[in-house]
Amino acid sequence: MCNTVGDMERTYTVTGMTCGHCVASVREEVSEIPGVTAVDVDLTSGSVTVSGEGFSDEAVKGAVAEAGYEVVS
Ligand SMILES: [Cu+2]
């Protein structure tokens, strides 16, 4: 564990995204999580990198599910 308060960055793998609209949906939902400051989605690999502080994996999974996709790792 890192004791630094502040920035954290985590990368998740999301399945089901097929186009720019999917990317936009995921980015929008994940951006709404309190503490999230940036969301970077790579459509080709399905990787979603979330930056911010104090957000949880569960919140990210929930937001991705809300958008209609699934976090697989
Ligand atoms: Cu799409």
Image: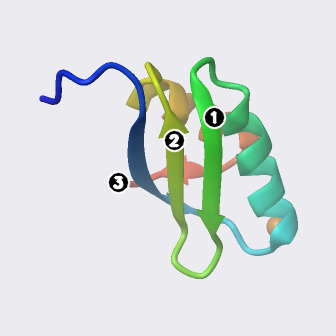
Residue tagged 3: 73
Amino acid marked by disc 2: Ser
* Badge 3 or badge 2: first in the primary sequence: 2
Q: Nearer the viewer, mark 3 or mark 2?
A: 2
Q: Position of residue 14 (x, y in %)?
A: 52, 58
Residue tagged 1: 37
Q: Quadrant of residue 20?
A: bottom right
Picture layout, residue 71 above or below residue 18: above
Amino acid marked by disc 1: Thr
The secondary structure type at the circle numbered 2 is: strand
* Badge 3 or badge 1: first in the primary sequence: 1
Label 3 to label 2, Cα distance in Å? Answer: 16 Å
The quadrant the C terminus occupies is bottom left
Q: Disc 3, ligand 1: is the CB inside 8 Å?
A: no
Q: Disc 2, ligand 1: is the CB inside 8 Å?
A: no
Residue tagged 2: 51
Neighbour tally class for label 2: few under 14, some 14-19, many 20 plus, Cα within 10 Å:
some
Q: Residue at x 79, y 41 (%)?
A: 28
* Badge 1 or badge 2: first in the primary sequence: 1
Q: Quadrant of residue 7?
A: top left
Amino acid marked by disc 3: Ser
